[in-house]
Image (tube, helix red, strand yellow):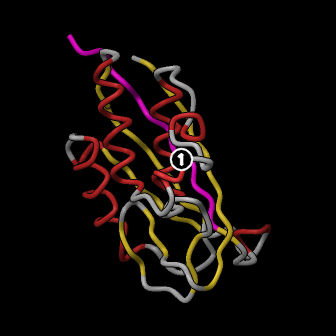
Amino acid sequence: MRIGHGYDVHRLVEGRALILGGVAIPYEKGLLGHSDADVLTHALMDALLGAAALGDIGHLFPDSDERYSGADSVLLLREVVSRLREKGYRVGNVDCTVLAQRPKLAPYVEQMRHRLADAMEIGVGSVSVKATTEEGLGFTGEGLGIAAHAVALLEEIE
């Protein structure tokens, strides 16, 4: 077994869709980034890559490469899982936390879990997604951005 941790943060801006865990969430702002800026999926990919010692998403999908401009992060997650399989690993389980003052994410958590589980080809019972506020503290608490942490367990394929 191998364990990895991922973290990502993006600024909230007007004129962008808000995508978290591959789910479009109605909100007046979205996350700024080269791809769809799905901070949850980005943290998850970094956790998976870290567990396998394969670097990070900035190395694998650089923002200097126009192929990834506006990219669907769930498709990138599928690519990460494919690379893990090539190296002899499968995803055991993941645990993710999104830090956002607004919008309220609880109504979308189950959709996120299902979307991420499908992309990783694992059961939804192996995918945890939690959301929390920071009670008005820091950049997430002030509504300036959204952050996410993820922990992933990889198992060797037998």
The amino acid on which the numbered mark 1 sits, given as a three-letter code, is Ala
In the rendered image, residue 155 lying in the magenta stretch gets the answer: yes
Q: Quadrant of the C terminus?
A: top left
Q: x, y percentage for residue 118?
A: 22, 50
Judged from this view, the residue extending furthest toward the top is: 158
Q: Start and end of the magenta stretch?
A: 146-158
Q: x, y percentage for residue 68?
A: 48, 52
Residue drawn at 44 percent across, 44 percent down: 95
Tell whether 121 sits left or right of 51: left
Q: Which residue is mark 1?
A: 43
For the residue pair 27 and 54, the one nearer the viewer reads as 54
- Label 1's element? helix
Q: Does residue 128 lie above or below 100 as drawn?
A: above
Residue drawn at 39 percent across, 59 percent down: 72
Q: Main secondary structure of the magenta part?
A: strand
Q: Does residue 71 lie above or below 140 as drawn?
A: above
For the residue pair 45 and 150, the one nearer the viewer reads as 45
Q: x, y percentage for residue 40?
A: 49, 56
